Amino acid sequence: MIELNWSIFVQMFNFLLLMFILNKILYQPILKILEEREKKISDGQQEVKDLAAQGNKLVATYNEKLQAAKVEAMASKANARKQAVEQVNAVIQDARAKAEQEILQVRQRVANEIEAAKKELEPELASMAATIAEQVLGRKVA
Protein backbone atom coordinates (compact mmCIF):
# COMPACT_ATOMS: atom_id res chain seq x y z
CA MET A 1 0.00 0.00 0.00
CA ILE A 2 0.87 3.57 -0.42
CA GLU A 3 1.98 5.25 2.61
CA LEU A 4 1.64 8.99 3.08
CA ASN A 5 4.50 10.53 4.90
CA TRP A 6 6.63 13.63 4.81
CA SER A 7 8.59 12.41 1.69
CA ILE A 8 5.60 13.06 -0.53
CA PHE A 9 5.63 16.70 0.50
CA VAL A 10 9.34 16.89 -0.22
CA GLN A 11 8.78 15.35 -3.66
CA MET A 12 5.94 17.80 -4.34
CA PHE A 13 8.13 20.68 -3.26
CA ASN A 14 10.97 19.38 -5.45
CA PHE A 15 8.57 18.99 -8.36
CA LEU A 16 7.16 22.51 -7.97
CA LEU A 17 10.66 23.94 -7.50
CA LEU A 18 11.84 22.09 -10.62
CA MET A 19 8.79 23.36 -12.54
CA PHE A 20 9.49 26.93 -11.41
CA ILE A 21 13.18 26.72 -12.34
CA LEU A 22 12.48 25.05 -15.68
CA ASN A 23 9.79 27.60 -16.41
CA LYS A 24 12.17 30.52 -15.76
CA ILE A 25 15.24 29.00 -17.40
CA LEU A 26 13.84 26.89 -20.23
CA TYR A 27 10.15 27.31 -21.05
CA GLN A 28 9.81 31.10 -21.04
CA PRO A 29 12.93 31.71 -23.20
CA ILE A 30 11.79 29.01 -25.64
CA LEU A 31 8.28 30.48 -25.76
CA LYS A 32 9.75 33.95 -26.24
CA ILE A 33 11.93 32.68 -29.12
CA LEU A 34 8.92 30.91 -30.66
CA GLU A 35 6.81 34.08 -30.37
CA GLU A 36 9.60 36.15 -31.95
CA ARG A 37 9.90 33.59 -34.73
CA GLU A 38 6.14 33.65 -35.30
CA LYS A 39 6.22 37.45 -35.33
CA LYS A 40 9.07 37.47 -37.86
CA ILE A 41 7.22 34.99 -40.04
CA SER A 42 3.99 36.99 -39.93
CA ASP A 43 5.92 40.24 -40.56
CA GLY A 44 7.74 38.57 -43.44
CA GLN A 45 4.47 37.32 -44.90
CA GLN A 46 2.96 40.79 -44.59
CA GLU A 47 6.04 42.31 -46.21
CA VAL A 48 5.76 39.79 -49.05
CA LYS A 49 2.09 40.70 -49.50
CA ASP A 50 2.97 44.41 -49.49
CA LEU A 51 5.81 43.90 -51.98
CA ALA A 52 3.56 41.76 -54.20
CA ALA A 53 0.90 44.47 -54.13
CA GLN A 54 3.51 47.11 -54.87
CA GLY A 55 4.89 44.96 -57.71
CA ASN A 56 1.41 44.49 -59.15
CA LYS A 57 0.86 48.23 -58.90
CA LEU A 58 4.15 48.91 -60.70
CA VAL A 59 3.26 46.39 -63.42
CA ALA A 60 -0.15 48.03 -63.85
CA THR A 61 1.47 51.47 -64.05
CA TYR A 62 3.99 50.15 -66.56
CA ASN A 63 1.23 48.63 -68.67
CA GLU A 64 -0.75 51.88 -68.57
CA LYS A 65 2.30 53.90 -69.62
CA LEU A 66 3.10 51.37 -72.33
CA GLN A 67 -0.46 51.56 -73.65
CA ALA A 68 -0.36 55.36 -73.54
CA ALA A 69 2.96 55.33 -75.40
CA LYS A 70 1.49 52.99 -78.02
CA VAL A 71 -1.52 55.25 -78.47
CA GLU A 72 0.73 58.31 -78.71
CA ALA A 73 2.99 56.56 -81.22
CA MET A 74 0.00 55.55 -83.32
CA ALA A 75 -1.36 59.10 -83.20
CA SER A 76 2.05 60.49 -84.12
CA LYS A 77 2.33 58.00 -86.98
CA ALA A 78 -1.15 58.89 -88.22
CA ASN A 79 -0.32 62.59 -87.98
CA ALA A 80 2.93 62.11 -89.88
CA ARG A 81 1.12 60.06 -92.52
CA LYS A 82 -1.55 62.78 -92.81
CA GLN A 83 1.10 65.48 -93.20
CA ALA A 84 2.90 63.40 -95.82
CA VAL A 85 -0.35 62.93 -97.76
CA GLU A 86 -1.06 66.65 -97.53
CA GLN A 87 2.45 67.45 -98.78
CA VAL A 88 2.10 64.97 -101.64
CA ASN A 89 -1.27 66.46 -102.58
CA ALA A 90 0.19 69.97 -102.44
CA VAL A 91 3.10 68.94 -104.67
CA ILE A 92 0.71 67.24 -107.11
CA GLN A 93 -1.56 70.30 -107.22
CA ASP A 94 1.44 72.56 -107.71
CA ALA A 95 2.72 70.33 -110.52
CA ARG A 96 -0.72 70.30 -112.15
CA ALA A 97 -0.96 74.07 -111.92
CA LYS A 98 2.50 74.46 -113.46
CA ALA A 99 1.64 71.94 -116.19
CA GLU A 100 -1.59 73.77 -116.99
CA GLN A 101 0.30 77.08 -117.05
CA GLU A 102 2.89 75.62 -119.41
CA ILE A 103 0.15 74.14 -121.62
CA LEU A 104 -1.52 77.55 -121.79
CA GLN A 105 1.80 79.18 -122.65
CA VAL A 106 2.50 76.59 -125.35
CA ARG A 107 -1.01 77.01 -126.79
CA GLN A 108 -0.57 80.78 -126.77
CA ARG A 109 2.83 80.47 -128.42
CA VAL A 110 1.42 78.09 -131.06
CA ALA A 111 -1.52 80.45 -131.68
CA ASN A 112 0.91 83.37 -132.01
CA GLU A 113 3.10 81.40 -134.39
CA ILE A 114 0.06 80.39 -136.47
CA GLU A 115 -1.04 84.02 -136.57
CA ALA A 116 2.45 85.12 -137.53
CA ALA A 117 2.62 82.43 -140.21
CA LYS A 118 -0.77 83.55 -141.58
CA LYS A 119 0.38 87.16 -141.70
CA GLU A 120 3.65 86.15 -143.30
CA LEU A 121 1.99 83.91 -145.89
CA GLU A 122 -0.95 86.23 -146.65
CA PRO A 123 0.90 88.33 -149.22
CA GLU A 124 2.07 85.19 -150.91
CA LEU A 125 -1.38 83.58 -150.73
CA ALA A 126 -2.60 85.02 -154.00
CA SER A 127 0.45 83.88 -155.93
CA MET A 128 0.30 80.42 -154.30
CA ALA A 129 -3.39 80.11 -155.11
CA ALA A 130 -2.70 81.04 -158.70
CA THR A 131 0.14 78.54 -158.91
CA ILE A 132 -1.99 75.77 -157.40
CA ALA A 133 -4.89 76.60 -159.73
CA GLU A 134 -2.55 76.54 -162.76
CA GLN A 135 -1.23 73.16 -161.73
CA VAL A 136 -4.70 71.74 -161.11
CA LEU A 137 -6.22 73.20 -164.24
CA GLY A 138 -3.19 72.81 -166.38
CA ARG A 139 -3.49 76.31 -167.80
CA LYS A 140 -2.60 79.79 -166.75
CA VAL A 141 -5.09 81.60 -164.56
CA ALA A 142 -5.37 85.38 -164.76
Image (cartoon, rainbow, N blue to C red):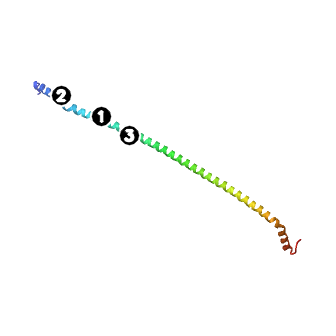
Crowdedness near tag 1: few (<14), some (14–19) or many (≥20) residues, C-alpha within 10 Å = few
Image quadrant for the N terminus?
top left
Q: Secondary structure at mark 2?
A: helix
Which is more foreground, mark 2 or mark 3? 3
* On-image quarter of the C terminus: bottom right
Give the vertical position of 64 relative to 115 (above or below): above
Viewer-nearest residue: 4 or 23: 23
Q: Give 30 or 132, whichever is nearer the viewer.
A: 132
Mark 3 highlights which residue?
52
Per the image, the residue denoted by label 2 is 20
Residue 129 drawn above or below residue 38: below
Q: Position of residue 99 (x, y in %)?
A: 67, 57
Q: Earlier in the sequence, mark 2 or mark 3?
A: 2
Residue 26, percent across and down? Answer: 19, 32
Residue that mark 1 sits on = 39
30 on left or right of 4: right
Residue 20 visible from this viewpoint: yes
Q: Residues within 10 Å of mark 2 (few under 14, many from 20)?
A: few
Secondary element at tag 1 = helix
At a point 14% along the width and 26% down the height, the residue shown is 13
Pointer 3 or 1: first along the chain: 1
Amino acid bearing label 2: Phe
Q: Quadrant of residue 138?
A: bottom right
